[in-house]
Amino acid sequence: MRSIMVHAGGDAAFESRLQVGLDLARRFKGHMTLVLPRPSQDYVAFDMFGGAHFIAEAFDAAETERGKLCSRIDARLKSEDVPWDWQMFDGTTSDVLINATRLADILVMSLDDAGMAGPARAWVSDVVTASRTPVLAVPASRKAISFDRAMVAYDGGFEAANALRAALPMLQIAGHVRITEIEIAPEEFPLTDAATYLSRQGISAEIAVAAKGDQSVEERLLAEVAAWRPDYLVMGAYSHGRWRETMFGGVTRFMLGELGIPVLLAH
């Protein structure tokens, strides 16, 4: 995990993303790239007759602020022991992050804090389901990440398997790994396959099968997270239009707003 990309911006949550990006770069001796979207479409105004014009003054003001942000972060990072660079692209936030991270090992994005509404959850959902790059989604208030306790939410599907493989570098340095299954159709998705795969990578993992009972899958998984208290969760991100969306994949967007811990997602 050497190519680490971080969604850069002037929002308050950027500090959290930056700190986690630095943690990853230090731990894995990697290079951090700060990806800064320039959403030029935000500066187009439409009139009542169907016309449109570009608001140059607003765009120039935003460019000035972006320049100040880059200078401020550059000055700060000079005292860090991590190599970094910037990439700036025109386009929507989601499109920029999808296109910029094709050769990245991981992309750090933000989550809204638990119970708070905002655009971060939708951006993460859009990016991770359209990209092949794993996303580490971090709550806005998180200032660092620990790698000791890792929980893997596993259902045997392709997305969960992709997330498991994407998380290998982090799982290999974890002190404790738990693979958790919310029991729905265990005969179709053998949990032992995941443990066997990890053992061949030198990772010892415990298995936990939680009966769904009368709870929803997301409620049961949240309870497992609360009880075991992992430092981060690994899970597949499911797109719409699959039968599994109603059983496990529908968890994705809900969980992103409720967990309160970093989540490594892959599609």
Image: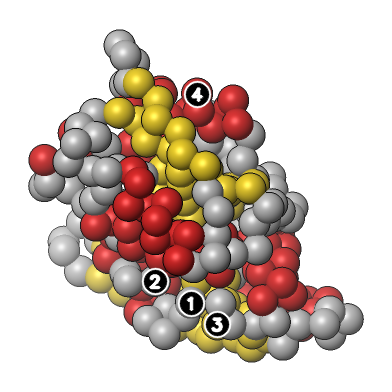
Q: Quadrant of the N terminus?
A: bottom right
Disc 4: which residue: 223
Which element carries disc 4, helix, strand or loop? Answer: helix
The span from disc 1 to disc 4 (Cα, nearest Å) is: 30 Å
**How many other residues sit within 10 Å of disc 2, few (<14), some (14-19) or many (≥20)?**
many
Residue beneath disc 3? 3
Of all residues, the one furthest to the right in this rendering is: 79
Number of dots carrying numbers: 4
**Which residue, given by chain and number where applicable, does mark 2 sit on?**
133
Query: Of callouts 2 and 1, which one flags the residue occurring earlier in the amino acid sequence?
Result: 1
N-terminal of the pair, mark 3 or mark 1, is 3
Nearer the camera: disc 4 or disc 2: 4
Mark 1 residue type: Asp
Gap in Å between the C-alphas at discs 2 and 3? 11 Å
Q: Residues within 10 Å of mark 4 (few under 14, many from 20)?
A: some
Earlier in the chain: of badge 1 and badge 4, it is 1
Q: Amino acid at mark 4?
A: Ala
Q: Position of residue 156 (x, y in %)?
A: 27, 48
Q: Residue at x 41, y 43 (%)?
A: 153
Along the horizontal axis of the image, is 154 left or right of 80?
A: left
Q: Helix or strand or loop: what does disc 1 sit on?
A: loop
- Element on which disc 3 rests: strand
Q: Determine the residue positioned at 64% across, 56% down.
A: 174
In the displayed structure, 254 sits above or below 219; it is below
Front residue of 138/180: it is 180
Inspect this view and state whether residue 121 appears.
Answer: no
Whether residue 178 sits left or right of residue 245 in the image: it is right
Question: In this figure, which residue is indicated by the disc labeled 1?
Answer: 105
- Other-residue count near label 3 (Cα within 10 Å), few / some / many at <14 / 14–19 / ≥20: some
